[in-house]
Structures are given as structure tokens and as C-alpha cells.
Amino acid sequence: MNTAESGALKLAAFEKGWEETLTPDNADLILLNTCSVRITAEERVLGRFAHYAGLKKKGREFTLVAAGCMAQRLGEKLRSQFPAIDYVMGTSSRSNFPLILDAIGQGKTFIETDELPAFSFSSLHHDKEESSFRSFVPIMHGCNNFCSFCIVPYVRGREVSRNPDDILNEINLLGEKGVREITLLGQNVNSYKWKNMDFSELLELTAANVQNTSIKWIRFLSSHPKDLSEKAINVMARNPVLCRHLHLCVQSGSNAVLKAMNRQYTREKYLDLTRQLRSAIPDISLSTDILVGFPGETNDDFNETLKLMEEVKFIYSFMYHFNPREGTAAFTLPDRIPDHIKSKRLDQVIELQKQHTKELLKNRLGDEETVLIEGISKKNADELITRTEKDEMAVAPGHRSWIGCFGRVKLISLQGNTFRASELQLIN
């Protein structure tokens, strides 16, 4: 989402006559589009603000803009910490950016009114400088779930769905530009709702809309288990343009912890969903998020997570331990887990996931796959990095002019979690 919104902000700057520089320290405008989903992301960006504040102290003249979720969460507190910041532009006031650019161009200061602007989607999020063959398309914004550990609803606001006509118009433009893969984005895509249209119907409409275009693969992120419907699963099953991969965040395998997290589904519900998915789409790969060390998590609770992993066998997981976020419901929960126990549990989860990933990938050896060619291998300039629709990486011999094309390969061997594949056979 941050990448898509950064692309939209860059396009807005290009439309106002700005050019991107490869030497940021010499720029006339520095914009940091921030993320708050992890505290480590905020810590990194604070270092960036300190760096640019230092440049201003040395006499460099430029406009410094703080944008995104961190700007929304901290507001003017951010400018109090770093007076060098000229504008704080949260997620709800992104529409002010063209006005800020106009003011800079005229040598003036943009004065924001007290009235908070309503959130509005940008019309295009594809930055051709980043990638000419892959693009993100936001379909909704915000979150109504209020998971007790998550800051997102507080910095993104309540759910707002995008007009399907605008979504299809953007996708059509991407098709005209030769984009090969799109990813539909939202904090919870499954809760998309526009009048009488739900996510499954939007998914069906999108799949039909890309026929006879350059777009051959569609993905979507992120999926909340409580809202993944049987209708959406059936749409995925009957539309081959929808990639055979789904990231379905479980967070924990314990019903007690899931309830404390306010996840609004049970372990049994999640396992039933995975069975439905594999029944409808036998070759689907599943990935997830796993959070260990939540306040009050017992050894039995933790073991329930390990058992769920054993049953589902994810192709990969984003694994992390609980860090309290001020402003979330979990921040004040008692029964904090000591750091050394959290670290030990996380190590166990990582080790188990490594075993499952290795096992699943090993079982794929000998398979033939369609892949999207993404770039040149860093280790060998004569080899290309490719990705399967199941979100697996494969290295294959080929020419750099093939980047952005689809090809067929045979998966021959494994090097870590990356396949080595036969020479690419290009396909349309």
C-alpha cells in the first residue's frame, strides 16, 4: 500500500513539472512516505528525519514533507521533534499534496485549514519508473477490525471502498501500458463493499475485465480470515487469471489468544477455510503472519500455533513477536511475556517454518511452471530472477530483454528457498 501511494504522490509531482533526482541530498523537495505498521519502521524513518534536519542546519534549502501513517499518528508532535519538517501530511490529507506543490512553486507557504479533508483515492498509482510490468491497485482504504495489537485503524481510519468504475478505469490504463500483473490492495480486501457489490463480485468483474489485455495475473492483499467468503473462493477457482496463492493472516493458533487479539474467528474457522481453499484449488499455496508472545500466551497456547502450522503447512510466513504499541488496546494488557521467552518461541516458529518451506519446495522439483520474469540475478548476470504464480522464486538462464515477459520453465533443483530452473521458453 505504501508503494502504491508513493507512486501516486510521485505522479502528482510529475504532473506539476517536478523531476526525480538520484541524489536526494541535493533535492529541492524531500518527501518521506512513512509506515506505522511496525515500530521498527518508525524508528528507521526517525533517523531519516534527523539526517535531513542536519542538512538544513548546514544551510541546505529544501522543503521537507512527512507523509503517511506516521504523520497521521503523530501529527504536529513530529514537527515539534523535528522543526525542519515543513509539512506534516497524514493519510487523510494526501489530497493537499498538489496544493503544497503549487505553494512551493510560487515561493509561498501552504496554509492548511482546520477542516480535515475527506479521504480520496488517487486515479493512478503506477509509477513507470519503478516497474513497467507490475502494478498495485488500491480498492479500499482503512480498517474496521481493531485487532488489539494493531495501529492501522487509528492511522488509516474506517473502511472506505473505491468506486468499481474507477478501479476498472485504472486497470484498463495499466493494460494499455503493458502491465502484466496487478495486485488489488486494501487493509482488508475481503470487506470491500460498494452499494450491492462485494469483494467476490469485484474479483469476478476484474478477472473478466482483463481478458484480451496484457494483464495475465491478478493477486490481492490483504485477506482477513473472518471475511473470506465461499463465493470469493469459488471465483478464484474458476478464474485462472487469479494467481494460485493466498496470504491469509492467522496470527495465532490458540482460540484464547485469537479472542484476546479481537481477531473475530476461531482456530476451527481458519482451518475450515484452508480446507475449503485446497478443496476448490488443490494446487494453491498459502502464506501467513504469525505473532508470538502476545500478553497472556501460555505454553499450551503457543503449542496450538505450532500444531496449526503443522496442519496447514504454509509456503512462507511473516513471523514476529509482540511489541506493545502505544494507542492500541493491547498496550495496557497485563501478563506480558518476558523477552527471552518471546525470542525462544519465535525461534521455534522460524525453525518449523523453514522445515515446511523446504519440504513444500522439494516436493515441487520436476514440475513445469509459468513464471513472470522479474529481473537479473545479482549472482550471475546471465541468469534471470522469475516468480511463479504460487509466489515462489526461480532462477533461470535468459536474456535481460525478457524482463517483464512470461515464460515456461522446469524446476530442477533448490538453492536455499530459490529454485534453479531450465532455460526459459517465452510465452505470450
Image (cartoon, grey):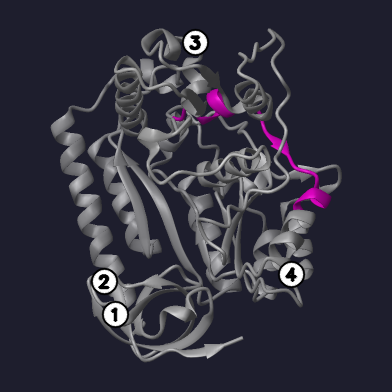
Q: Distance between the residues labelled 3 and 1?
A: 52 Å
Q: Few, some or many C-alpha atoms within 10 Å of disc 3 (few <14, some 14-19, many ≥20)?
A: some
Q: In which quarter of the image is residue 180?
A: bottom right
Say if the magenta span includes residue 12.
no
User: Helix or strand or loop: what does disc 4 sit on?
Assistant: loop
Mark 3 or 4: in front is: 3
Mark 2 or 4: in front is: 4
Q: Can residue 301 be seen in this view?
A: no
Amino acid type, callout 3: Glu
Which residue has dot 4 on it? 210
Amino acid type, callout 4: Val
Q: Position of residue 310 (x, y in %)?
A: 32, 61
Q: Do the residues labelled 2 and 4 touch (CB within 8 Å)?
A: no
Which residue has dot 3 on it? 76
Mark 2 or 3: in front is: 3
Q: In which quarter of the image is the N terminus?
A: top right
In the drawing, does residue 197 fall left or right of residue 270?
A: right
First of labels 2, 3 by sequence position: 3
First of labels 3, 4 by sequence position: 3
Amino acid type, callout 1: Lys
The region drawn magenta spans 150-167
Q: Distance between the residues labelled 4 and 1?
A: 33 Å
Amino acid type, callout 2: Lys
Q: Few, some or many C-alpha atoms within 10 Å of disc 1 (few <14, some 14-19, many ≥20)?
A: some
User: Helix or strand or loop: what does disc 2 sit on?
Assistant: helix
Nearer the observer, 65 or 417 = 65
Determine which of the numbered discs, if any, sits on residue 281 in the image. Answer: none
Which residue has dot 2 on it? 358
Q: Where is residue 204 in the image (x, y as percent from the top left)?
A: 76, 64
